[in-house]
């Protein structure tokens, strides 16, 4: 690993720049003084189209790529659109990784998720637990696609001496999140539900499942900082987790959201909805060993996310 930083004029391609992850990476790069950030709107570049992706990369020849683009969603979306999650994620990563290699791109960062680890792997989840047991069924298609992406990176590194790094973020939240109740993750869903319950003057709000599953939440700007940190460090080692190292139960989360939003009713649990995996706390030892730690406390991060939600509503942007 070298300590050299990236040239501020290097060409850096950020995919998924309109999404929560890609937009955060772009913000972080801009703040870091990078002047040559390339993005491609979906209307101009369909990441599912192999020819288009390869042609774009051959023309653009970026020095670095951050793969922030993916088909993502919460427990219900993952469980319902199983073919879409498997197919689209396989295509996006295969097109980008092979296209990057063909275009001579030496450094790339691929992002996955903590759901790649076996459902009952020992907690906190270390990177070494990959492929040691069966996956959580509700998001198995997404996880399989992301595991294939990790293996693609490893294979290009082994066969072609590329430096394609896989980083696995825990559950993320923050600006540009998806607040659609049918497809979102739990945190944006609870922000929206609590806010709407407050406006309606309801006495309760509905939280899916039993409230007992535990989840770790990382503010997306912390994730972006970790990604740029790894790239700037020249990290080219094995798979690395990106988390904050602590988790909460869904009940605790629901209570914190109520506090931030100012909704004073009570929580009702909907047992007809799945709990998913009981716990997925990541080990952040590897990343801490490299010198990076998350800084955003959960309640402060939820307050910022709520502010973003309100701004989007005020601006009439789709949630
Ligand atoms: P997961 O981490 O892949 O399971 O995805 P989610 O973020 O969608 O769900 C996390 C946990 O929150 C699960 O146990 C859900 O049942 C629970 N949950 C509670 N209320 C909601 C909700 O309104 N939306 C979502 N997506 N999950 C919820």
Image (spheres, grey):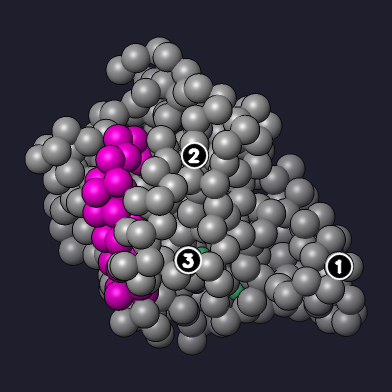
The answer to whether the beta carbon of the residue marked 1 is less than 8 Å from any atom of ligand 1 is: no
Residue range in magenta is 85-108
248 or 89: nearer the viewer? 89
Dot label at residue 198: none
The image quadrant where one finds the C terminus is bottom right
In this picture, residue 117 sits left or right of residue 215: left
* Residue marked by disc 3: 45
Of the pair 190 and 91, the residue shown nearer to us: 91
Are dots 2 and 3 in contact, CB under 8 Å?
Answer: no
The residue nearer to you, when weighing 113 against 50, is 50
**Left or right: where 262 falls relative to 267:** right
Q: Which mark is residue 12?
A: 2
- Circle on res. 315: 1
Is residue 239 among the parts visible in the rendering? no
The correct choice, above or below, for 107 with respect to 24 in the image is: above
- Counting from the top left corner in percent of width and height, residue 191 is at 72, 65
Which image quadrant for residue 118?
A: bottom left
Question: For the point 47% across and 23% down, which residue is it?
Answer: 6
| Callout 2 crowding tier (Cα within 10 Å): few <14, some 14–19, many ≥20 | many
Identify the main secondary structure in magenta: helix
């Amino acid at each position: 690993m070298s300590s050299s930083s990236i040239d501020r004029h290097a060409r850096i391609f950020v995919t998924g720049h309109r999404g929560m992850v890609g937009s955060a990476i772009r913000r972080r790069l801009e703040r870091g003084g990078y002047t040559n950030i390339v993005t491609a709107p979906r209307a101009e570049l369909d990441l599912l189209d192999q020819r288009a992706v390869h042609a774009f990369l051959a023309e653009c020849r970026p020095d670095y790529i951050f793969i922030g683009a993916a088909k993502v969603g919460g427990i219900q979306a993952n469980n319902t659109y199983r073919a879409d999650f498997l197919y689209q994620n396989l295509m996006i990563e295969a097109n980008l990784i092979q296209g990057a290699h063909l275009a001579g791109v030496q450094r790339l960062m691929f992002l996955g998720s903590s759901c790649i680890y076996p459902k009952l792997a020992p907690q906190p989840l270390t990177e070494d637990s990959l492929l040691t047991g069966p996956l959580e069924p509700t998001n198995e298609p997404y996880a399989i696609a992301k595991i294939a992406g990790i293996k693609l990176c490893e294979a290009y590194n082994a066969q072609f001496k590329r430096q394609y790094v896989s980083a696995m973020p825990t559950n993320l939240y923050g600006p540009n999140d998806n607040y659609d109740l049918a497809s979102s993750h739990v945190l944006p869903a609870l922000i929206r539900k609590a806010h709407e319950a407050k406006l309606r003057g309801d006495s309760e709000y509905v939280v899916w499942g039993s409230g007992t599953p535990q989840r770790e939440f990382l503010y997306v700007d912390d994730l972006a900082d970790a990604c740029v940190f790894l790239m700037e460090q020249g990290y080219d080692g094995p798979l690395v987790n990106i988390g904050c190292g602590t988790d909460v139960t869904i009940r605790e989360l629901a209570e914190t959201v109520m506090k931030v939003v100012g909704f004073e009713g009570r929580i009702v649990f909907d047992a007809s909805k799945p709990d998913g995996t009981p716990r997925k706390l990541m080990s952040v030892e590897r990343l801490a060993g490299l010198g990076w730690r998350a800084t955003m406390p959960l309640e402060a991060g939820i307050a910022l996310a709520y502010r973003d939600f309100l701004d989007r509503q005020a601006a009439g942007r789709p949630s």
